[in-house]
Image (spheres, grey):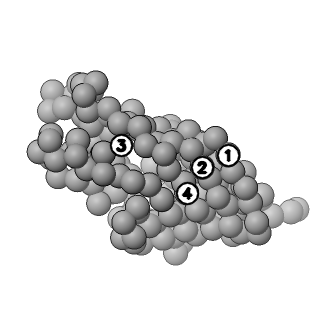
Amino acid sequence: MSEPDPVRVALRFVNEINRHDVPALLALVAADHVFVDSVGQELRGRERLSAAWTAYFEMFPDYRVVIDDHFGAGPNVGLFGTATGTCRASDGGLPPERRWRIPAAWHAIVRDGRVERWQVYADNEPVRKIVAAARIPAPE
């Protein structure tokens, strides 16, 4: 049996992000998975990863990644597109003035069918401004 295609694994990971399925995301990551955010902060460990994704999906309940293009080179996968979401209001609503859409890229390293590293490249300043205006703590 051949090893799973890294591009297909990375695209499946995006699909699980879009479904907000934290257990499915955790099932796709390697035991030593590293998540790197857009400012270079690293998050390691499944428990921390689970808590971070759960909090992010709570803060941005309509968060979605749209991939317009991708390529693979060995275990490296590059994904290019946009990320969108709306910062939830205290009443649970999704006010249009809290909606954002930013160009983004992702670098995944996939080995043995598992995502070892997921790194985001994006200018999150529009998101930070919305979160600051909403006066809620930013997700880590």
In the rendered image, which residue does mark 1 sit on?
69
In space, the residues marked 4 and 1 are separated at their CA atoms by 11 Å
Answer with mark 3 or mark 4, whichever residue precedes in sequence: 3
In the rendered structure, the answer to whether residue 67 lies left or right of residue 36 reads: right
Q: Position of residue 77 (x, y in %)?
A: 67, 61
Which image quadrant for residue 39? bottom left
Answer with mark 4 or mark 1, whichever residue precedes in sequence: 1
Q: Amino acid at mark 4?
A: Trp
Q: Amino acid at mark 2?
A: Phe
In space, the residues marked 3 and 1 are separated at their CA atoms by 24 Å
Mark 1: which secondary structure?
strand
In the rendered structure, the answer to whether residue 70 lies left or right of residue 53 reads: right
Q: Residue at x 76, y 66 (%)?
A: 73
On the rendered image, what quadrant is the C terminus found in?
A: bottom left
In the rendered structure, the answer to whether residue 94 lies left or right of residue 29 reads: left
In the rendered image, which residue does mark 3 sit on?
57
Mark 3: which secondary structure?
helix
Q: Amino acid at mark 1?
A: Asp
**Residue furthest left as drawn:** 135
Q: Position of residue 8 (x, y in %)?
A: 72, 51
Q: Which label was assigned to residue 17?
A: none
Is residue 55 shown to the viewer in this render? Answer: no
Q: Position of residue 50 (x, y in %)?
A: 39, 57
- Asked if marks 2 and 4 touch (Cβ < 8 Å), the reply is yes
In the rendered image, which residue does mark 2 sit on?
80
In the rendered image, which residue does mark 4 sit on?
106
- Asked if marks 1 and 2 touch (Cβ < 8 Å), the reply is yes
